[in-house]
Amino acid sequence: MKNTVATFAKMKENGEKISMLTCYDYSTAKLEEAAGINAILVGDSLGNVMLGLPDTLSVTMEDMITFGRAVSRGCHDTMVVIDMPFMSYQVSIEQAVMNAGRLMKEGRGNAVKLEGGASVCPQIKAITSAGIPVMAHLGMTPQSVNALGGNRVQGKSEAAAKQMIEDALAVQEAGAFSVVLECVPAKLAELITKKLTIPTIGIGGGAGCDGQILVYQDMLGLFSDYTPKFVKHFAELGSQMQAAFKKYDEEVKASTFPDEAHSFKIDDEVLERLY
Ligand code: KIV
Ligand code: NA
């Protein structure tokens, strides 16, 4: 059955945990769906893990649409949320609605995600009014890395924690159907989760959140540039892939690949006449 915003609301009501992973391509989307993941985020983290950029700031609408479309084609039951890239929603409400619309029309997403609290509530209101579900994102918001002064845990002081609670209530009031809490102390994320009627999705937000999300390259051990504290490796596919590449290299150089089973035949009679 198709996972929708109604599924999210119902799962919170029933106390069922929501599983999310990021995804950026068709083949992986099919695997995540087959595993029963509730929702996929086509995150602007694709700037880091797919494009090799140092942060998410240079990711474009076109990037999000290209990867979003690829993922959507692989999903039937999984809800697809597409990130709004840096500067696609900050400038004006009008631009925000237009760009959210493009992610739905061209990217074929089921919802969009944007970063920020009270300051982006007018955008959240306008986008949801256009019939587009919005997931909010608080705590460590990577598009503000330059303002935050690096990737670090957020909401540790009383003032910052109060601000985050207010922002969470504000995005809920503005119409967000869910909110990501990134790099937030577990007890604070748990408190926010209790105060909200919409589900919280944690990434470095502890077990008290209503759901969890991880970048799939991180959880498969495919990305080694840096490893945040909240990342758990559920497999070591990076070393498995490297071993397979090495084996291939050796077999090519030893002429043991391809063998007959992986080659095509021509009739001997035809071949003879060619000599
Ligand atoms: O872009 C992304 O992958 C994200 C998640 C980490 C929440 O925003
Ligand atoms: Na993101």
Image (cartoon, helix red, strand yellow):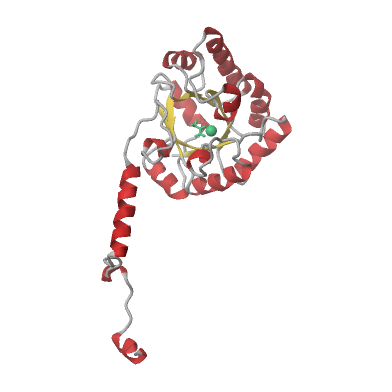
The front one of 44 and 174 is 44
Does 273 sit above or below residue 73?
below
Towards the viewer: 152 or 193: 152
Residue plotted at (31% across, 46% down): 240
Q: Residue furthest bottom?
A: 273
Vertical position of residue 52 compared to residue 191: above or below: below
Number of marks drawn: 0
Q: Quadrant of residue 116?
A: top right
Q: Is residue 97 left or right of residue 203?
A: right
What residue sits 49% from the left and 15% below the top?
Answer: 192
168 to the left or right of 225: right
Point out residue 217 in the picture as x, y percentages from the top left corner: 41, 39
Please name whichever residue, 9 or 219, is drawn nearer the observer in this view of the structure: 219
Query: Residue visible at 39% across and 45% down?
Result: 31
* Residue 107 seen in this snapshot: no
Residue 240 position (above or below residue 254): above
Quarter containing the C terminus = bottom left
Residue 96: give x, y in percent of width and height.
68, 33
Q: Position of residue 144 (x, y in %)?
A: 59, 27
